[in-house]
Image: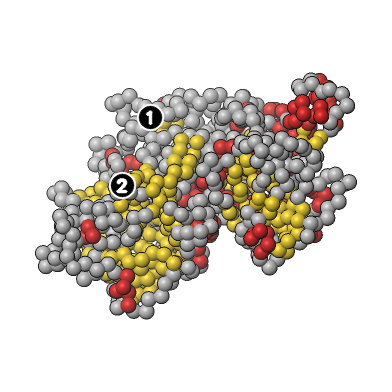
């Protein structure tokens, strides 16, 4: 809801309020963002406004007529350059004469329902067109420029989105946008913690918390993508905020290029945060009568901790960012061929893998890199989108039909934005790549980036991919982009004066969105998955076209538990994908239990990336059981409400929980990285249950290989069994150690308040079937369900001698 009372504006969501007013000078004063409040009149809102009798010393008076008014000492909705506000500016515009001083003052406001799509960029949407929309128009008379500030209120999700648009009103003069942000938020306190998620390839989404002090902290990308180095999702919170208590504000940008988030604590102890396009190496020329639209950004406030903030973000992304057939459709369980074969495959090998995948319950077979051109390594053939008939004599269609005959859907990997120098495409059109022919090009992964500022290149990619996607019964596409930008130079504009080279990075993103929009519209039944060397382009811009993104090329469960934990702060589980892979892991050489690999990957859109033909009979049976579990609870894993537990400083114990929308089913997970000797106690903290319902609490019971116990088994065997001996191997084929059984029946209220005390972990003083074998990298999955009929008790416990009686 948007309320206007004279010059006072209040934007209300379900539980929050965002307030500002127009000052006598025409500037916009930010007043409040937080828990929902009631203000009955413009005069009543006066209490929210900061009072000034004299301007601070050594500050700039906006006008000599107002000796108490300095823009540096005001909380503003937007700030420009050159009129006294020396903090991080919202906008910098240069005229043809080089002037960069601007002063945008209030012109008018319009409140309406609905949202019109952007012309060049993706954005949020509302199916029912019920979203409330406020447009504030500001005018700089001297420069002849209008600045529109757009506010969209998504009441149901407690999210407010913002964007800005610049109009050049001049009839003959161009203007140059050097900086334009999407959100500016000024806060009247300085005791915040700024949280960013940084990393690298195979090491995405490492959380970093910075207690703000005087000065500026910047989170930004200059890779041409939203990047694995710095995700555009950031948070502001108070130092004592936890997962369940305290204030948190989340911000994100609906954009896939270079981004910029800056937080500044100024001399007046106020805090400002801005987010938008990275101004580094950015300048955009706006011709007379033309306009420039900035990306949309979103923000949400919660006083229920990080989990509360995340739930707002999750619901917003599911309902107002992702779209199309797979918005709420359960995602299939897939096998990806990459780590099973890399480039070394033929049709026979692929079909052998597909048959094994079908045997364990997989639903979708995905052929990764290496199927086109002469692509036997990563030095050649990107851009040559014709089938390698030596590997696939029947083409994609022939392979897809054979895969379909096995009862599996078929998917394909592509990297449409790239070209190898060793390719037919580059030989024919070297000018279609981004590089300066006068200098030596700096390459990444032996490839170059196609110039998507060029309409001919955009059309080529659309046509080439349309040909591939329509050549066979393709149900899934993994869209990759395996390098970052260098040599920002387009031969499409060189010497033509069409636009500036500093516009290339942004225009590339516009071209990318044209391609993605055209192909998703043309192939609405294909499930598209974004990828950029893993999570190098994990953002809301991509999610506006593709409902899921490959979170990281690192499939190691111990790394992934931290990465997925951190993705979950801003993104719902349905949007990031996770695979169970082989051990030792291909990225870390770490060995982790198969059930732990499953337990981590299951809390996402799920699949496998290993060679099933290399697994033992016991491992195959375990995979079958895990796939059956995932299918049974798939909707909850992908679309349930996700909860994290507070991590201790050592980040050794992770707890996750997901709850179905109707609160009848919940699944929990506990993972331990490293054992601490003589520590046997763990409890599972549950949230989100219906306090009035009764639930059954059970665990997935694990049978343990006796090899895990080493020579300790000699305390129970009549003969000595040497570790790693043939005898031990033979015994392990017939004898397993039973795992602990957890069964309780209690109300949601009791389970949430009391927390579930789990069976004791092994503490070096004894072991039996009531002790939890819980060593390095071990985990457990727990099931909390309302109706006993829904619990297939024998599904969890195979030992018929055990009685499944609830401990009331």
What is the number of the mark on residue 430?
1
Residue drawn at (44%, 31%) of the image: 419
Q: How is the image coloured?
A: secondary structure
Residue drawn at (35%, 41%) of the image: 505
Q: Within the image, what quadrant is residue 622 found in?
A: top right
Give neighbour class at mark 2: few <14, some 14-19, many 20+ (Cα, 10 Å). Answer: some
Q: Secondary structure at mark 2?
A: strand
User: First in sequence: mark 1 or mark 2?
Assistant: 2
Residue 509 visible in the snapshot? no
Question: Which residue is label 2 attached to?
Answer: 216
Q: Is residue 172 left or right of residue 793?
A: left
Position of residue 8 measured from the top left corner of the image (x, y, whole percent): 31, 73
Q: Secondary structure at mark 1?
A: helix
What is the number of the mark on residue 690?
none
Q: Within the image, what quadrant is residue 722 found in?
A: top right
Tell me the CA gap for discs 1 and 2: 42 Å
Position of residue 610 measured from the top left corner of the image (x, y, whole percent): 66, 32
Q: Is residue 253 left or right of residue 101?
A: right
Residues 799 and 413: in front is 799
Residue drawn at (73%, 61%) of the image: 746
Position of residue 266 measured from the top left corner of the image (x, y, whole percent): 27, 53
Residue 116 visible in the snapshot? yes
**Of marks 1 and 2, the one in the foreground:** 2
Q: Is residue 447 above or below residue 566?
A: above
Residue drawn at (43%, 39%) of the image: 229
Marks 1/2 in contact by CB < 8 Å: the verdict is no
Quarter holding the C terminus is bottom right
Residues 712 and 252: in front is 712
């Amino acid at each position: 809801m948007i309320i206007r009372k004279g010059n006072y504006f209040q934007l209300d969501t379900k539980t929050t309020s965002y307030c500002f007013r127009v000052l006598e000078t025409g500037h916009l004063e930010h007043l409040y963002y937080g828990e929902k409040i009631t203000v009955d009149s413009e005069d009543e809102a006066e209490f929210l406004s900061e009072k000034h009798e004299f301007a601070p010393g050594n500050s700039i008076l906006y006008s000599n007529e107002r000796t108490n008014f300095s823009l540096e000492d005001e909380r503003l909705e937007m700030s420009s350059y050159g009129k006294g506000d020396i903090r991080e500016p919202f906008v910098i515009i240069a005229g043809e004469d080089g002037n960069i001083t601007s002063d945008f003052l209030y012109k008018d406001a319009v409140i309406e329902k609905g949202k019109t799509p952007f012309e060049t960029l993706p954005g949020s949407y509302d199916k029912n067109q019920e979203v409330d929309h406020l447009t504030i128009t500001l005018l700089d008379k001297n420069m002849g420029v209008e600045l529109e500030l757009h506010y969209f209120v998504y009441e149901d999700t407690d999210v407010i989105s913002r964007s800005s648009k610049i109009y050049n009103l001049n009839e003959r003069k161009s203007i140059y946008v050097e900086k334009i942000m999407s959100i500016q938020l000024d806060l009247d306190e300085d005791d915040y913690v700024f949280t960013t998620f940084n990393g690298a390839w195979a090491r995405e989404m490492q959380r970093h918390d910075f207690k703000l002090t005087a000065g500026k902290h910047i989170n930004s990308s200059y890779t041409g993508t939203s990047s694995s180095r710095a995700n555009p999702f950031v948070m502001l919170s108070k130092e004592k905020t936890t997962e369940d208590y305290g204030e948190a504000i989340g911000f994100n940008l609906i954009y896939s290029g270079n981004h910029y988030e800056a937080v500044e604590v100024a001399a007046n102890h106020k805090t400002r945060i801005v987010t938008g396009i990275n101004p580094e190496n950015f300048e955009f020329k706006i011709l007379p009568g033309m306009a420039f639209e900035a990306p949309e950004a979103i923000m949400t406030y919660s006083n229920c901790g990080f989990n509360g903030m995340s739930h707002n973000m999750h619901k917003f992304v599911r309902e107002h960012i992702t779209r199309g057939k797979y918005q709420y459709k359960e995602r299939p369980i897939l096998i990806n061929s990459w780590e099973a074969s890399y480039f070394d495959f033929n049709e026979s090998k692929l079909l052998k893998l597909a048959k094994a995948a079908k045997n364990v319950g997989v639903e979708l077979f995905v052929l990764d890199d290496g199927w086109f051109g002469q692509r036997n390594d990563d030095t050649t053939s990107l851009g040559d989108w014709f089938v390698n008939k030596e590997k696939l004599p029947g083409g994609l269609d022939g392979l897809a039909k054979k895969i379909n005959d096995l009862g599996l859907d078929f998917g394909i990997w592509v990297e449409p934005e790239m070209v190898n120098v060793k390719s037919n495409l580059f030989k024919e059109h070297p000018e279609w790549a981004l590089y300066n022919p006068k200098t030596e090009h700096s390459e990444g992964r032996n490839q170059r980036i196609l110039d998507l500022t060029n309409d001919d290149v955009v059309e080529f990619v659309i046509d080439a991919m349309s040909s591939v996607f329509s050549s066979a019964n393709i149900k899934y596409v993994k869209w990759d982009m395996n390098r970052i930008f260098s040599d920002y130079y387009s031969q499409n504009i060189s010497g033509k004066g069409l636009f500036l080279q500093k516009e290339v990075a942004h225009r590339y993103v516009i071209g990318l969105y044209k391609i993605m929009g055209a192909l998703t519209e043309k192939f609405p039944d294909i499930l598209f998955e974004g990828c950029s060397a893993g999570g190098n382009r994990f953002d809301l811009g991509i999610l506006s076209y593709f409902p899921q993104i490959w979170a990281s090329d690192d499939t190691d469960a111990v790394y992934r538990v931290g990465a997925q934990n951190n993705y979950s702060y801003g993104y719902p589980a349905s949007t990031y994908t996770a695979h169970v892979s082989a051990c030792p892991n291909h990225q870390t050489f770490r060995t982790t239990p198969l059930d732990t690999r499953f337990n981590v990957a299951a809390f996402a859109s799920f699949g496998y990336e290993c060679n099933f033909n290399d697994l033992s009979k016991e491992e195959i049976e375990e995979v079958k059981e895990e796939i059956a579990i995932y299918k049974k609870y798939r909707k909850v894993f992908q679309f349930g409400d996700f909860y994290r537990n507070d991590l201790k400083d050592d980040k050794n114990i992770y707890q996750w929980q997901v709850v179905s929308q109707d609160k009848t089913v919940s699944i929990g997970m506990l993972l331990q990285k490293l054992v601490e000797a003589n520590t046997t106690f763990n409890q599972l903290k549950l949230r989100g249950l219906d306090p009035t319902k009764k639930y059954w609490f059970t665990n997935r019971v694990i049978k343990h290989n006796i090899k895990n116990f080493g020579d300790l088994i000699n305390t129970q065997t009549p003969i000595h069994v040497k570790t790693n001996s043939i005898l031990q191997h033979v015994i392990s084929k017939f004898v397993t150690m039973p795992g602990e059984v957890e069964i309780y029946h209690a109300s949601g209220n009791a389970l949430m308040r009391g927390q579930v005390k789990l069976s004791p972990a092994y503490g070096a003083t004894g072991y039996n079937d009531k002790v939890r074998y819980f060593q390095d990298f071990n985990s457990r999955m727990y099931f909390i369900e309302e109706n006993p009929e829904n619990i297939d008790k024998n599904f969890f416990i195979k030992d018929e001698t055990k009685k499944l009686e609830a401990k009331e």
